Image (tube, rainbow, N blue to C red):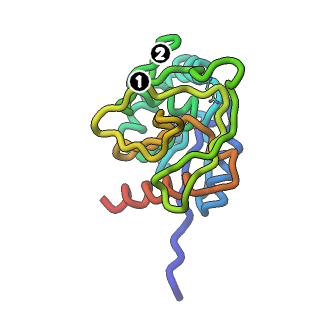
Amino acid sequence: MPHIPAPKRIGVLAIQGDYAAHAAALEEVGAEPVAVRKPEELEPLEALVLPGGESTTMLKFLEKHQFFQALQRYCASNPVFGTCAGAILLAREVLNPTQRSLGLVDVTIQRNAYGRQIDSSILTAPTSLPGGPLEMVFIRAPRILKVGHGVEVLARRDGDPVLIRQGHIMAATFHPELSHDRRVHSAFLALVDSANRR
Ligand code: GLN
């Protein structure tokens, strides 16, 4: 009998925002999504997704429920993928306005950076992921203004990094879970795989 590996159990922070869309995307790439609402739920999971939504609301919840430090500890040593508000939570420095963050990805990020009129948009831009240009859904998106030396840029929008990786962490300023293309979630699973083999 061939050995069929059990699906990876990947947490999705389910405090607020579009965690259900991430769960569906993870299922499509063969993982088992698990909703995370309490610190103790992180422990058995192989990796975590921080979804889009409203980073201030997530931050308030995390602080109110003594969850901030446990999340920071988990994300410091396990594979994590943050999209939009999730990317804001992971950043080293947040602007517009300044706000507390986990400080695990060496970027400066500006919230709601693309102006009122065009605050949400869908466009196709080049990426270094195999398979050609990628559809990107931006919703009141942040803009990555600065990246540190250890940060690999996997896609850009008009020169701005929009998909990045630093070690075991990936972040996107757009919403790959809202497109049909599953290359970004597959790339994250590949990252989880390589982290397991280290
Ligand atoms: N504007 C939100 C924030 O600043 C992010 C938007 C999103 O996640 N789609 O937290």
Quarter of the picture containing the C terminus is bottom left
x and y percentages locating residue 82 in the rendered image: 52, 38
Viewer-nearest residue: 152 or 39: 152
Q: Give the residue at x 49% y 40%.
A: 156
Query: Would residue 156 appear left or right of 33 to someone viewing this image?
Result: left
**Which residue corresponds to mark 1?**
108
Q: Quadrant of ligand 1?
A: top right
Q: Are marks 2 and 1 in contact (CB under 8 Å)?
A: yes
Does 81 sit above or below residue 15?
Answer: below
* Residue nearer the viewer, 153 or 125: 125
How many residues crowd mark 2 within 10 Å: few (<14), some (14–19), many (20+)? some
Q: Between 160 and 66, which is closer to the camera in this rendering?
A: 160
- Amino acid type, mark 1: Thr
Q: Nearer the viewer, residue 158 or 115?
A: 158
**Residue type, label 2:** Leu
Q: How many marks?
A: 2
**Relative to residue 122, is residue 104 drawn left or right?**
left
The extreme bottom residue here reads 1
Q: Which mark is residue 95?
A: 2
